[in-house]
C-alpha cells in the first residue's frame, strides 16, 4: 500500500482516473448534491477539468444531474459497482442469525467492517428493534484510531500492511495519532489476551463498543466485527465479562461455519 504522496509520483499513476474517483468521493450521507464549483473548491481542480469529469461520470451513470439546479448526485452505477464486492462476503449470509440474536440481547447493532484507506468502512449491520442511537449503514465510515472496530481491523491486517497503515496514520493524522496511539497499543494487547478490544467514549461520548478481528481475510480483505451499546449504564465489567466474550464466541462460530 503506497502513501498517497508516493502514489501520485508513481510512473503508473493515472491522474485522470484518480480525479474522477475524487469527484465521487466528495459525496457523503450529509452531502448529497454538489455543483461543479463545489467540486472545484473542494478538490482544487480547474473548472474546465471538473466539467469534463462530471460530464463523463453522468454519461457512465455514476452521477445524475439535476437540470433545474445544475447540481449532481450519485447515480445508480455506484451501487452496481459495489454489489459484486458485497456479494462475495459469505459471512453476511452465514452470520446473520447469530448477529441478530446478539443484537437483540445487547440492544445494540452488531456490524462487520473492513479498511478503506485510513478509515473503517461498514459492510454489514444487524440491529434489533430496540437498538441504540447508532445504526451504521453499509458504506458508512468510522475512524481507525478512535473506534473498537478500527483498532480490531488494524490488528487483523498482515504485519507489513499494518505497519504501513500505522505510519500513514501518524503522518497524516498527527494529532489524532498522538491522542490515541496508546489506546491502539492497549487494544492490540487486549486482543492478544482476551480475543477482543473495547472502546468507551473515544469516538462518541455516549457510546461504548467491543470488537473482534476475523481470524482469516475474506477475499483478501481483513474484517472485524463490533457490538455498540450506550456508554451510560455500561461498565468495563459488562464489556469484558459479558459483551466481549459473547461477540468473540459469535465470530468464532462464523469462522467455524466458513471452515477457517
Image (tube, rainbow, N blue to C red):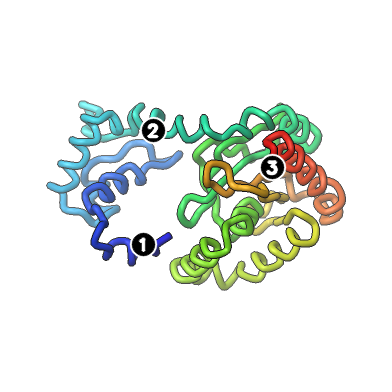
Identify the mark nearer the N-term, 2 or 1.
1
Of residue 201 and residue 227, the one placed in the foreground of this image is: 227
57 relative to 217, above or below: above
- Whether residues under marks 3 and 1 lie with C-beta atoms below 8 angstroms apart, the answer is no
Mark 1 secondary-structure assignment: helix
**Marks 1 and 2: in contact by CB < 8 Å?**
no
Up/down of 122 relative to 126, above or below: below
The percent coordinates of residue 242 (x first, y second) are 85, 47
Give the total number of marks visible in the rendering: 3
Judge whether 104 appears above or below 15 on screen. above
Q: Tell me the distance, in whole angstroms, between the alpha carbons under discs 2 and 1.
A: 23 Å
Tell me which residue sits at (75%, 31%) in the image. 98
Residue under circle 2?
A: 81
Q: Secondary structure at mark 2?
A: helix
Q: Which residue is mark 3?
A: 260
- Earlier sequence position, callout 3 versus callout 1: 1
The span from disc 3 to disc 1 (Cα, nearest Å) is 34 Å
Residue at (33, 42) in percent of width and height: 24
Q: Is residue 5 left or right of residue 60?
A: right
Q: Where's residue 90, x and y in %?
A: 60, 32
Q: On the rendered image, what quadrant is the N terminus found in?
A: bottom left
Q: Residue at x 72, y 50 (%)?
A: 210
Amino acid at each position: 500500500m503506497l502513501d498517497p504522496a508516493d502514489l501520485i509520483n508513481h510512473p503508473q499513476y493515472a491522474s485522470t482516473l484518480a480525479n474522477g474517483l475524487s469527484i465521487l468521493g466528495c459525496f457523503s450521507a450529509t452531502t448529497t448534491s454538489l455543483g461543479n464549483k463545489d467540486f472545484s473548491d473542494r478538490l482544487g481542480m480547474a473548472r474546465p477539468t471538473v466539467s469534463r469529469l462530471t460530464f463523463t461520470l453522468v454519461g457512465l451513470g455514476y452521477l445524475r444531474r439535476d437540470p433545474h439546479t445544475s447540481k449532481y448526485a450519485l447515480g445508480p452505477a455506484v451501487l452496481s459497482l459495489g454489489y459484486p464486492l458485497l456479494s462475495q462476503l459469505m459471512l453476511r449470509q452465514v452470520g446473520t442469525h447469530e448477529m441478530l440474536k446478539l443484537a437483540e440481547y445487547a440492544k445494540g447493532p452488531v456490524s462487520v467492517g473492513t479498511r478503506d484507506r485510513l478509515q473503517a468502512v461498514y459492510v454489514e449491520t444487524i440491529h434489533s428493534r430496540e437498538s441504540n442511537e447508532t445504526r451504521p449503514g453499509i458504506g458508512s465510515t468510522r475512524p481507525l484510531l478512535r473506534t473498537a472496530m478500527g483498532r480490531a481491523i488494524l490488528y487483523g491486517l498482515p504485519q507489513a500492511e499494518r505497519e504501513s497503515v500505522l505510519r500513514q496514520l501518524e503522518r497524516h493524522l498527527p494529532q489524532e495519532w498522538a491522542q490515541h496511539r496508546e489506546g491502539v497499543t492497549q487494544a492490540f494487547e487486549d486482543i492478544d489476551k482476551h480475543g477482543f478490544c473495547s472502546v468507551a467514549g473515544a469516538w462518541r461520548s455516549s457510546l461504548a463498543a467491543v470488537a473482534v478481528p476475523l481470524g482469516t481475510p475474506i477475499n483478501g480483505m481483513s474484517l472485524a466485527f463490533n457490538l455498540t451499546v450506550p456508554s451510560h449504564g455500561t461498565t468495563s465489567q459488562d464489556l469484558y465479562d459479558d459483551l466481549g466474550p459473547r461477540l468473540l464466541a459469535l465470530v468464532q462460530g462464523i469462522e467455524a461455519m466458513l471452515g477457517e
